[in-house]
Amino acid sequence: MSDSPALPVFILDDEEIPFTPGQTIIQAARAAGKYIPHLCWHPDFAAHGSCKLCTVKVDGRMGAACTVEARAGQVVENRGPELDDKRRTLLQMLFVEGNHFCPSCEKSGDCVLQATAYELGMMSPHFDHFYPDRPVDASHPDVLLDFNRCIMCELCTRASRDVDGKNVFALSGRGTASHLIVNSESGRLADTDFSVHDRAASICPVGVILKKRVGFATPIGQRRFDVRPISAQVEEDI
Ligand code: SF4
Ligand code: FES
């Protein structure tokens, strides 16, 4: 018998999940190898709570698994037809708000938005497209920015500010006019101290922040999410 007291548990889709007090539902689920769909949450950063893809039912009430703390005895519903249907709607909204033309995007097969849509069985964008027309920023020698694919998860802003200590990115505007900007007087990436080695250069879950000269290098069939669905990569940094 172990001397250490057993961890408290909650129930996630009929399974007992142990947790350390203070952990959120998504943190405890991840540690137990259980996938809760998410876009704006990343294990290395504080929760953001904006995408709502991680919405679960906690004792019958909707809550964001990335912000709700685990509690002993909670009954949490995660993967069911009702919740996955709502998640598909959120995904469809994200797809039409940007220009997600996956067949021509070098992030295809390596994109968290696309992989989540496959996981949840999204077949079409369903809503009318917005077709944003934001200029691409190719000014930086090593990195290209295509703002038309941004899902405003703010992982790049958090990585740049909190890890790189640079504050290169920010969100600007309100409502549907919100969009990502570069913090320099000219608004160009080349006029910041951004480096391809920054954490922010490799954090984007979609195809906005792209390293130059390395695209389309992985054959179709061998790309990250070709090999295993996103729900089978729970313990990796997604
Ligand atoms: S550029 Fe990428 S990481 Fe930054 S907010 Fe947009 S989607 Fe998120
Ligand atoms: S992952 Fe929880 S709100 Fe985005």
Image (tube, rainbow, N blue to C red):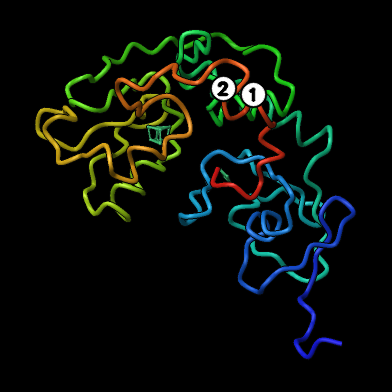
Q: Which of marks 1 and 2 is nearer the N terminus?
A: 2
Expressed as whole percent of the image width and height from the top left, the position of residue 118 reads 68, 23
The amino acid sitting under disc 1 is Asp
Quarter of the image containing the C terminus? top right
For the point 50% across and 21% down, the residue is 218
Expressed as whole percent of the image width and height from the top left, the position of residue 43 reads 53, 53
- Does the residue at mark 1 contact the one at mark 2 (Cβ under 8 Å)? yes
Q: In which quarter of the image is residue 131?
A: top left
Number of other residues with Cα within 10 Å of mark 2, as a class: few under 14, some 14 to 19, many 20 or more: many
- Circle 2 residue: 109
Expressed as whole percent of the image width and height from the top left, the position of residue 211 reads 32, 27
For the point 28% across and 42% down, the residue is 197
211 shown above or below 63:
above
- Circle 1 residue: 226
Q: Could you give the CA–CA distance between mark 1 and mark 2, rounded to whole angstroms?
A: 6 Å
Instruction: Decide if ligand 1 comes within 8 Å of the CB at mark 1.
Output: no
Q: Residue furthest right?
A: 14
Under circle 2, the secondary element is loop
For the point 69% across and 31% down, the residue is 229
Under circle 1, the secondary element is helix
Left or right side of 13 for 237: left
222 shown above or below 152:
above
The amino acid sitting under disc 2 is Gly
- 177 vs 233, nearest the viewer: 233
